[in-house]
């Protein structure tokens, strides 16, 4: 029996007619259809017909093309892994946080490395200030042992974002395992080797792309024999998402990257089954809840389609996805709102079918996390698993006409863009030509414009700001001290053996790498690490006589809130200098019902820029308002009333204010189009209204009032 069988059926045409009646002449397409940054029109209602033409047609979880998940049982037997990043600077501080968090719900190691380590530099070779910034400084097997002290990697998966040092870093990891007498056969997790992601982010590599692929092939071939559960190939959407890309672009660019890696490794003698089993994708999760769910579903579908085209079997077509909450939409202002953002993003990742996840601490963009912020982030995942019963459902999104239709539209659009990249010669050729960068910049510009106009909202930043919030203590890290500490440790590591026996052994093992065959290179590097060779020494030896590295224009990583945070920062600096915020007097005219709507709008509009609004309950006459405005000492005034009263109120009010203080900025709340010229002639400097550029007008007023140079 169909639901609601006792009620007469209503078709879509009848519903639309009723909806148009309620719109009272407003265009249906403008009011009820939402155009996304992906170019997809979101309908106000979805029916079964929306999912009737899906490609592929309706499938079950665990069946090709895996739209509904790679496993038929979803999370019933195997939950996604809670793989929280820990952004600490030294192996010891990382280990302390890791062991605590592993005892409180985390079940995977996520080793985040600092920039010098990812570039293959030992800490004493890097610039002070960079060592330990954003991740762990790690250069030797002793460092690896300190970072992983007390962690059994035969039972715990490990994720390492390695940058360009996958092979040298794995050599340190395996050397640590073998020192402990542990087998590498049980190593599982992900060595996140993604050279195209690095070059997209940084614009260059410390080695040639061909050499990067050689090392990827050598490491992957070694893993087949020695660590069969360890993934060695990474494809990350983070650089694109966190530069403002839309979801179609993020999907297309990651798919094109994955295809380039497959081709490069096939050329180096690996089989498709070997490659497919050791590749993972990593996606950032943003605020568009349903779009993010559809993204993960579409990624699995399209990757299955690609691997089928390569001739891969059912297992080769399965894709494991790691997710992390995005940086693009996180804020330093009102930072506790980031907890809410992270929660919805994590829910999207779980419903979308991720295999592992990192939920960023709410203070990620401000400072290294503390125990509190780590706990809240970690507990988001634990609550989703333990309290929300998501692990007892198989594909809870399946069958939603909206999500099925959205996934299909997203997949089709991403496939079209992917084919365009293929026509350009692949992902690296496209990056060289600047195609992805241009595509992303266009979308990022649209996003910035919509944020400036407040068509898009960042709660607590460009809408609903809280000027009374207490800013987070940034707990400034002394990176110079960390540099000195790590440099001293490296000096001791190289010189502590007085009879030079260990040093001689290290040189001998490194020299053996020079004559090692590709098949034995990884094992030779591991032996060099066990003998004491550092990360940089191994990397340099691997890359002797390498060709010149590639150079491109990188994508521009940014956070959407940064321009607005800059406004508030300028206002805070002004406050520190003068003892009060930059002030705006509100010339509210008439009784409260007459001015309240525009007064409330004005407060919200200018508090975005950190201004203090001098409020009142309204003035009966322009003379009284002008007198109070002049007495306040404020150098800017906003007149708030109604369009009907403005012609009578504005001229005398502006004349009296500017007659006494000509440099006062007078703004009118509203934009009565037929009165604008008259008000400008009377001395009004600007108008604020719902279609005004909030960012530009706050920036301009800060300049006019000397808040910024």
Image: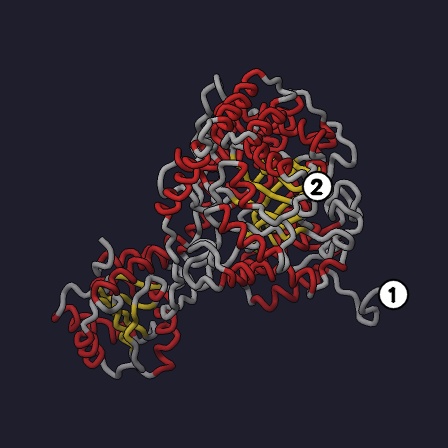
Q: Position of residue 696 (x, y in %)?
A: 33, 55
Q: Is residue 46 left or right of residue 598?
A: right
The one nearer the camera, 347 or 560, is: 347
Q: Is residue 443 above or below residue 646?
A: above
**Would residue 210 be visible to someone looking at this image?**
no
Q: Secondary structure at mark 2?
A: helix
Q: Is residue 130 left or right of residue 42?
A: left
Q: Secondary structure at mark 1?
A: loop
Considering every residue shown, the one lying at the far right of the view is: 1
Look at 46% across and 25% down and name the residue there: 550
Chain-order first, disc 2 or disc 1: 1
Q: Position of residue 358 (x, y in %)?
A: 58, 51
For the residues labelled 2 and 1, the Cα–Cα distance comes to: 33 Å
Q: Position of residue 116 (x, y in %)?
A: 44, 37
Q: Which mark is residue 1?
A: 1
Considering every residue shown, the one lying at the far left of the view is: 660
Q: Which mark is residue 301?
A: 2
Count of all numbered marks drawn on residues in the image:
2
């Amino acid at each position: 029996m169909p639901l609601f069988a006792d009620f007469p059926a209503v078709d879509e045409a009848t519903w639309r007619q009723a909806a148009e009646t309620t719109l009272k002449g407003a265009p249906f397409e403008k009011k009820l259809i939402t155009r996304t940054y992906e170019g997809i029109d979101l309908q106000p209602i979805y029916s079964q017909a929306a999912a009737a033409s899906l490609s592929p047609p309706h499938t079950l979880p665990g069946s090709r093309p895996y739209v509904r998940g790679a496993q038929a049982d979803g999370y019933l037997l195997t939950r996604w892994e809670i793989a929280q990043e820990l952004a600490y600077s030294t192996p010891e501080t990382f280990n302390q946080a890791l062991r605590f968090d592993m005892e409180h719900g985390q079940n995977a190691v996520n080793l985040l490395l600092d920039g010098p380590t990812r570039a293959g530099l030992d800490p004493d070779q890097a610039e002070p200030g960079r060592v330990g910034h954003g991740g762990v400084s790690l250069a030797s097997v002793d460092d690896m042992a300190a970072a992983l002290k007390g962690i059994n990697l035969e039972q715990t998966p490990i994720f390492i974002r390695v940058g360009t040092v996958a092979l040298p870093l794995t050599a340190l990891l395996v050397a640590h395992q073998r020192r402990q007498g542990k087998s590498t056969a049980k190593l599982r997790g992900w060595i996140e080797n993604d050279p195209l992601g690095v070059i997209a982010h940084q614009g260059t590599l410390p080695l040639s792309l061909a050499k990067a692929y050689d090392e990827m092939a050598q490491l992957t071939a070694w893993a087949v024999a020695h660590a069969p559960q360890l993934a060695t190939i990474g494809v990350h959407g983070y650089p694109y998402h966190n530069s403002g890309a839309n979801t179609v672009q993020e999907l297309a660019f990651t798919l094109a990257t994955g295809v380039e890696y497959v081709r490069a490794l096939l050329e180096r003698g690996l089989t498709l089954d070997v490659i497919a089993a050791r590749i993972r994708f990593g996606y950032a999760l943003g605020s568009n809840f349903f779009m993010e769910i559809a993204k993960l579903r579409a990624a699995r579908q399209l990757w299955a389609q690609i691997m089928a085209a390569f001739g891969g079997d059912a297992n080769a077509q399965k894709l494991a996805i790691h997710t992390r909450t995005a940086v693009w939409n996180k804020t330093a202002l009102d930072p506790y709102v980031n907890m809410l953002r992270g929660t919805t993003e994590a829910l999207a990742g779980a419903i979308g079918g991720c295999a592992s996840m990192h939920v960023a601490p709410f203070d990620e963009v401000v400072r290294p996390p503390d125990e509190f912020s780590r706990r809240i982030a970690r507990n988001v995942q634990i609550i989703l698993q333990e309290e929300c019963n998501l692990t007892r459902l198989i594909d809870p999104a399946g069958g939603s006409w909206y999500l099925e239709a959205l996934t299909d539209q997203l997949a089709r659009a991403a496939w079209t863009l992917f084919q365009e990249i293929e026509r350009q010669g692949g992902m690296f050729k496209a990056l060289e030509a600047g195609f992805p960068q241009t595509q992303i910049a266009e979308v990022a510009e649209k996003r910035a414009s919509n944020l400036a106009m407040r068509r898009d909202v960042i709660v607590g930043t460009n809408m609903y700001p809280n000027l009374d919030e207490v800013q987070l203590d940034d707990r400034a890290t002394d990176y110079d001290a960390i540099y000195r500490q790590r440099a001293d440790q490296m000096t001791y590591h190289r010189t502590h053996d007085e009879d030079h026996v260990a040093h001689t052994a290290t040189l001998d093992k490194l020299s053996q790498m020079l004559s090692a065959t590709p098949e034995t290179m990884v094992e030779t590097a591991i032996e060099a690490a066990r003998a004491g060779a550092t990360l940089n020494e191994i990397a340099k030896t691997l890359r002797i006589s390498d060709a010149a590295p590639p150079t491109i224009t990188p994508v521009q990583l940014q956070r959407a809130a940064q321009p607005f945070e800059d406004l508030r920062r300028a206002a805070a600096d002004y406050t520190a200098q003068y003892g009060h915020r930059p002030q705006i007097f509100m010339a509210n005219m008439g009784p409260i019902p007459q001015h309240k709507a525009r007064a409330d709008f004005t407060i919200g509009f200018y508090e975005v820029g950190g201004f203090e609004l001098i409020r009142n309950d309204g003035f009966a006459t322009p003379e009284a308002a002008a007198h109070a405005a002049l007495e306040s000492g404020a150098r800017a005034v906003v007149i708030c009333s109604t369009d009907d009263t403005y012609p009578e109120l504005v001229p005398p009010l502006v004349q009296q204010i500017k007659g006494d203080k000509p440099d006062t900025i007078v703004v009118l709340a509203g934009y009565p189009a037929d009165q604008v010229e008259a008000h400008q002639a009377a001395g009004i400097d600007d108008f604020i209204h719902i279609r005004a550029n909030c960012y530009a007008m706050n920036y301009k007023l800060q300049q006019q009032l000397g808040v910024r140079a």
